[in-house]
Amino acid sequence: MTEAFMRLDGKAAIVTGSATGIGAAVALKLALRGASVVINYTKSRSEAEETQAAIQKIGAQTILVQADVSNDADCRRMAKAAEDAFGRIDILVNNAGSTKIVDHADLEGLAAEDWLRIYSTNVVGAFQMIRACAPAMKRQGFGAVVNVSSIAGVAGIGSSVAYAASKGAMNTMTIDLARALAPEIRVNAVCPGFVATRWFKDSLGQAAHDKMVAGQQKITPLRRAGTPQDVAESVVFFCAEGAQHITGEFLLVDAGLHLSLTPLTAR
């Protein structure tokens, strides 16, 4: 694929949950390709400002928007902020996510409130962002939505049953809205496996994080753990002209982890 097919000059993007980790890597990669970017955060303002500074350093336009995607009014306000700043919305990356780490066999470990909180961000939030951005995309005759899902939603693994179910719902929504919003708007999803981010270190602890990385190096066919940059490259592919004939698709970005899973090891 030529470099020209990956350029996004003149495009405007919103990346939810983009202060750190995968979202920050996606925002920076889009900016490097020429896009103006809305950086969204809920609580991590200082980290969001660091991401903004990195984007400004390469000469791209960017604004910060504090918003909680589980709140519909916040979603609509973020879409308006993008249009006010850049005059358009071409790309939406639904990266904001929530989970709770609970063994899948521990049915008492998840309360109804946990399910509702996880779904309100991972599924409802993504839907609300698409709804908020769709009118601008429809008016200009094109748009690209990329949902950052997970191998959890394909294989029934991950941090908890609720998380896996929410990503399965996101995958179904990707197919549904790819059909409903065509032909102007393309909707696709990337499904990462384990990605070594600060979130995992903070949630699991350094020792458990390092054990996960070592495990990925042993069990995945490519013998490596994922990085935020790996996922960002795949997201940008779906945003660019080279993917203009693709919609309703999932891309597993997991070093081949899905090839190694069995019913006994998936849990």
Image: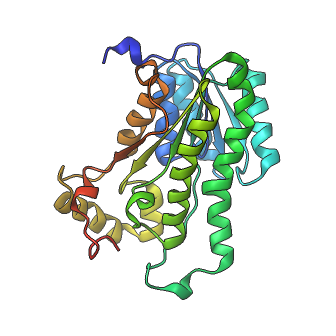
**Quarter of the view holding residue 50:** top right
Q: Which residue is most to the bottom? A: 108
Question: Is residue 232 or residue 91 the one in the foreground?
Answer: 91
Q: Is residue 29 left or right of residue 36?
A: left
- Where is residue 238? Give x, y as percent: 45, 30
> In the rendered image of this protein, does residue 22 appear above or below residue 151?
above
The total number of labels drawn is 0
Q: Residue at x 58, y 44 (%)?
A: 176
Q: Residue at x 23, y 56 (%)?
A: 259
Viewport quadrant of the C terminus: bottom left
Q: Residue at x 70, y 49 (%)?
A: 69
Q: Residue at x 45, y 56 (%)?
A: 198
Question: Is residue 262 or residue 180 the one in the foreground?
Answer: 180
- Where is residue 193? Give x, y as percent: 36, 55
Q: Which residue is most to the front? A: 179
> In the rendered image of this protein, does residue 25 appear above or below residue 155?
above
Q: Is residue 95 at all visible to an observer of this figure?
A: no
Q: How is the image coloured?
A: rainbow
Q: Is residue 141 at all visible to an observer of this figure?
A: yes
- Where is residue 109? Give x, y as percent: 54, 84
**Quarter of the view holding residue 1:** top left
